[in-house]
Amino acid sequence: MAKQSMIQREIKRKKLCQQYKDKKKEIKNSIKLSRSFEENIILQQKLQKIPRNSLNCRKRNRCWMTGRSRGFYRDFGLSRHVFREMAHSCLLPGITKSSW
């Protein structure tokens, strides 16, 4: 299991992403439309004042059962440990153990 503090931090980041999404989009569009260099700098400073945790690249994929962030299979939303256990107990349809 992942630490609860790490899981709560990820939840906080998701909320911040949703909260600042429209504001970031609005500032970026105004940067594209701006003509003067001074106006562009002011808009860039506004964009930099937005919290860093509100960026999409800060989000981390986590297993929905254990909260583990490493060894994550995106197709299933599981970490490799849970995926292996579920596959062995036939809880994932269509998944078979490979042999060669």
Image (tube, rainbow, N blue to C red):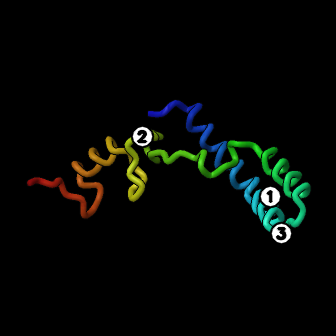
Residue at 71% x, 48% y is 16
Hey, what amino acid is under mark 1? Lys
Q: How far apart are marks 3 and 1 (CA)?
A: 16 Å
Q: In which quarter of the image is residue 52?
A: top right
Residue at 58% x, 47% y is 59
Q: In which quadrant will I find the N terminus?
A: top left
Identify residue for label 1: 23
Q: In terms of secondary structure, where does tag 1 sit? A: helix
* Callout in the foreground (2, 3): 3
Q: In this view, does 55 lie above or below 93?
A: above
Q: Position of residue 44 (x, y in %)?
A: 81, 52
Identify residue for label 3: 33
Q: In which quadrant will I find the C terminus?
A: bottom left
Q: Which residue lies furthest to the front in this view?
A: 37
Q: Is residue 14 left or right of residue 83?
A: right
Residue at 76% x, 53% y is 20
Hey, what amino acid is under mark 3? Leu
Residue at 89% x, 52% y is 42
Identify residue for label 2: 70
Q: In which quarter of the image is residue 34?
A: bottom right
Q: Which of marks 1 and 2 is nearer the N terminus?
A: 1
Q: In terms of secondary structure, where does tag 2 sit? A: loop
Which residue is at the front of the view, 26 or 32?
A: 32
Hey, what amino acid is under mark 2? Arg
Mark 2 closeness class: few <14, some 14–19, many ≥20 residues within 10 Å: few
Q: Position of residue 26 (x, y in %)?
A: 81, 63
Q: Position of residue 21 (x, y in %)?
A: 73, 58
Mark 3 closeness class: few <14, some 14–19, many ≥20 residues within 10 Å: few
Q: Position of residue 82 (x, y in %)?
A: 34, 44
Q: Is residue 77 left or right of residue 90?
A: right
State the mark number for residue 40: none
